[in-house]
Amino acid sequence: MPMRMRRTRGARLPYGTLVAAATAALLATLVTPAGARPDPAAVPAGAQATAGLPVRESRPVHSYADAIRESVWVDTGLDGDGDGRTDRVAVDIVRPRETAAAGRKIPVIMDASPYYSCCGRGNESQKKTYDADGNPVQFPLFYDNFFVPRGYAFVAVDLAGTNRSDGCDDVGGRSDIRSAKAVVDWLNGRARGYTSRTGDARARATTWSTGNVGMIGKSWDGTVANGVAATGVEGLKTIVPIGAISSWYDYFHSQGAPLYNANPSWLSEYVNSPEAQARCGAVQQRITAGTPYSGDRTPAWAERDYVRNAGKVKASVFVVHGQQDLNVRANHFGQWWDALGAQGVERKIWLSQTGHVDPFDFRRADWVHTLHRWFDHYLLGYDNGIDREPMADIERAPDRWTTDRHWPPRATATTTLRPAPGTAAGPGVLGRVPAAPGSTATFTDDPALGELDWAARIDGATPEKAGFVTRPLSRELRLSGSSKITVTATPTTATAHLSAVLVDLGPDTIRDYGAAGEGITTLADRTCWGASTPGDSACFKETAARTADVGYTVVSRGWADLGTWADPAEERPLTPGRAYTMTLDLAAADHVVPAGHRLALIVAGTDKDLLDPPSTTPTLTLDLTRTWAKLPLVGGAAAFGRATSGVYPAVPSPARTTAPSLSGAVPPAAVSGPRVPGAGAAR
């Protein structure tokens, strides 16, 4: 635990602090481009005192322009590329010159990424840049600009095989994680670093690093943070995974069913440097052999599963995820969050309505302020109270947020809802009463349709789905957490895939996660978040919520291969005409179904553009007496009973001009092809 800083009632800010604060405000604006607005957080609030008591936070008192910029190569102890020598990974560092001159040690914020050269980081796809001598000039994103003046070092690590590093990227495996863990070890004096890629001159961090490290990153970067934390490495005090993978199996498969291009080997080729591409073919062949398209669980998948090692995590964890992220889907944060909670790990979470988007691009000012306080607490040990604040921030509507002291709320209880036939042509009913014996529902897999088509056709008896709906709610009903859908299905063929989705049926205005930007629009104006140099600007394009008026909203989704009904590690051929029972895990979600809306459960086959179809076209018959949903409802069964009784309000239909043609928001275009766990609105 970080140390608690004692505060003295009635203390006054000394004159030197006020001067430093004024100097810092000047430094933060020295290189602000014309037309850009300065960082709202750059003017130190510490010059203020509440009731004479200053808020303890780090201040921008160091020169960013004069900061030390250097590169070090850290030995990973692996020889991934088989060249006969251990691999060194490139580590670009920027840190205050003043603390170095004073001999004062400082903490480190670290982003380990495969994207610094191939693809870029952030909404503007920034890459690292270097001068003619190979010294780092631009560090992507705002972390360096904002935190280095406040007394932190920022460290940007090229994963093995990428940019200026040796070795081969292995897509979340041993090489990826050792690449970053070795740097944490080096910062704590436990690994060897060198001043060049091939030389023998040693570089030591213990002269300037406290050893306290906070890892941060979006998508693949955040995934590496998860993986390093799961090693239990000493010195890693906190991680901030944003839209991050917790198990690579679950990025490419869902309970045996293949998602997208279901083999990771092409990703290694995608991010490797040109030199690594020429030498890493054998590594990619091993990845392909170890991660079969069949969806069978193998040791290679286990190596890339960080959830199973949640018990080793010593760092605090600040999770950020888009609930409509169709790249790194919401099940990744859900299973990680639950596993960390079971181990008593200190946690915080933000859940947005966006797709694969960084909080810097959907809630910028609040994000920078919160992240600043988070790092100050866990890396500097400041008692600023952030560890005692509400655990969860959740976006309820575009730019409208609520908080929860605990997440899921402690009043949440798993509630069993059961599907049953309806009384007329159309959907069945979803409620607490079991279906009559012998009740069934039948659908035929249609790979040309998906969850948005099913939702649009919920009130019609269409052959590609089985749908079940509640009556209109008399009061709102909140789901918070992960759902499970148990189905008993009889297929007509030897292979079959299943999809299950929960849908809020009713008009709403949501972030348009299916459009370019996945819920944001990038504007021309820039704001500045820290200090700049001519080669590294702290000023970034502003964004605004991009919204859509819809007639329904998919709340949660899950997929499975029915062939894994007996063994989740291995697909087996099905016997046509035989009934099979299995449980589908749906992605974690937090959603309020308003009064007047209906909640729907839809069970179908292939979810277009999200799930690859099976090799056959099965028809499946559900035994409704042995099919049910277990949902995490705030207030439990009693809340469901209250919401489905009494008078319900009339809800107007959305105007024709804003109603979805079949979908409202549609999956991002990139879903239909191979995806990169850093692509999307803001890599």
Image: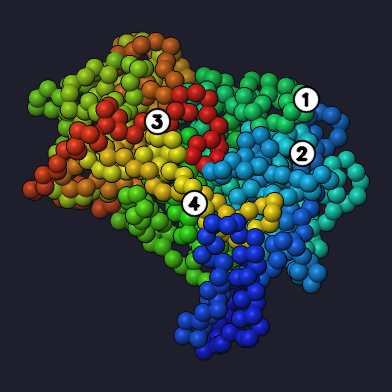
Q: Position of residue 579 (x, y in %)?
A: 31, 18
Q: Earlier in the sequence, mark 2 or mark 3?
A: 2
Please tell me whether mark 2 sits on a helix, a strand or a loop: loop
Q: Is residue 577 above or below residue 54?
A: above
State yes or no: discs 2 and 3 in contact (Cβ < 8 Å): no
CB under 8 Å between discs 3 and 4 = no
**Spatial separation of the CA atoms under disc 3 and disc 4:** 28 Å
- The N terminus is located in which quarter? bottom right
Q: How is the image coloured?
A: rainbow
Residue lying farthest to the bottom in this orientation: 10
Query: Badge 4 is on which residue?
Result: 525
Q: Amino acid at mark 4?
A: Asp
- Disc assigned to residue 667: 3
Kindly report which numbered mark, 4 or 2, lies closer to the viewer in this rendering: 4
Crowding around mark 2 (Cα neighbors within 10 Å: few <14, some 14 to 19, many 20+) is many
Disc 1 marks which residue? 279
Q: Residue reaching furthest front?
A: 34
Q: Residue at x 72, y 31 (%)?
A: 273
Query: Distance of mark 2 from mark 3, alpha carbons?
Result: 35 Å
Q: Residue at 75%, 68% (x, y): give it.
A: 99
